[in-house]
Amino acid sequence: MAELSDNICVRKAQKTDLAAILRLLADDRLGRHREDTSGSPHADYLTAFDAVSRDPNQYLAVFEQGDEIIGCLQITFIPGLSRRGALRGQIEGVRVAANFRGKGYGTKMLRWAIEICREQGCKLVQLTSDKTRQDAQRFYKDLGFVQSHEGFKLEI
C-alpha cells in the first residue's frame, strides 16, 4: 500500500473490494446501463476479477481514504514490437466517487498510474474515453494526453 497525499492510499484491489469497484463503475450515465450492482457480484465479475488478479500484466488499483474506497483504475501493460519493442501502459476504468469529484483526486490517481507505467518501463501511456464524456476528455488533455488517434470498438 502506498500513500499519495490527503490521507489517500493506493493498493492492489482484493476480491472483497469488488462490490465497491462495481458501484464506482456504475456511478455515471453510461455505467449505470452496463454494470449490474444488484445483490452480490455476478459470477462473471468474479471470474473476470480472478483473471485480472492472476495476470502479471494487470494492475487493478483502489484508492482509499480511511476505510472508504474513493476511486479505482486498471492498468494493463502491453508488450509490443512497434516503437522498437516499447511496453505500453493502457489505463481503463478510471472512476472517482461522486462526492470526491472535482477536488483533485482524479489528477492524483492518474499521476500515480503514469508513474507506475514509467517504473515498469513503459514508453507510452494510452487510454480511451467515450466520445460523450466531454469532461473526462478535458481532464485527460489537461494532464497532457493528446487525442492522436481515432479508436474503434466492435461488440461481439
Image (cartoon, rainbow, N blue to C red):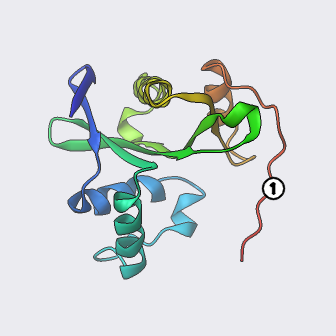
Position of 73 with respect to 90 (left or right) is: left
Mark 1 is surrounded, within 10 Å at the Cα level, by few (under 14), some (14 to 19) or many (20 or more) other residues, namely few
Instruction: Name the residue: 49% across, 68% down.
Output: 35
Residue 45 position within the rendered picture, expressed as x and y whole percent measured from the top left: 40, 72
From the viewer's perspective, is residue 155 above or below residue 72?
A: below
From the viewer's perspective, is residue 41 above or below residue 93?
A: below
Residue 25 position within the rendered picture, expressed as x and y whole percent measured from the top left: 46, 55
Q: Amino acid at mark 1?
A: Phe
**Front-most of residues 139 and 61:** 61
Position of 92 with respect to 8 (left or right) is: right
Instruction: Name the residue: 72% across, 31% down.
Output: 84
Residue 73 position within the rendered picture, expressed as x and y whole percent measured from the top left: 44, 44
Mark 1 lies on residue: 152
Q: Pick the quarter of the image with the C terminus.
A: bottom right
Residue farthest along the right direction in this orientation: 150
Q: Pick the quarter of the image with the N terminus.
A: top left
**Front-most of residues 99 and 60:** 60
Q: Secondary structure at mark 1?
A: loop
Residue 85 position within the rendered picture, expressed as x and y whole percent measured from the top left: 67, 36
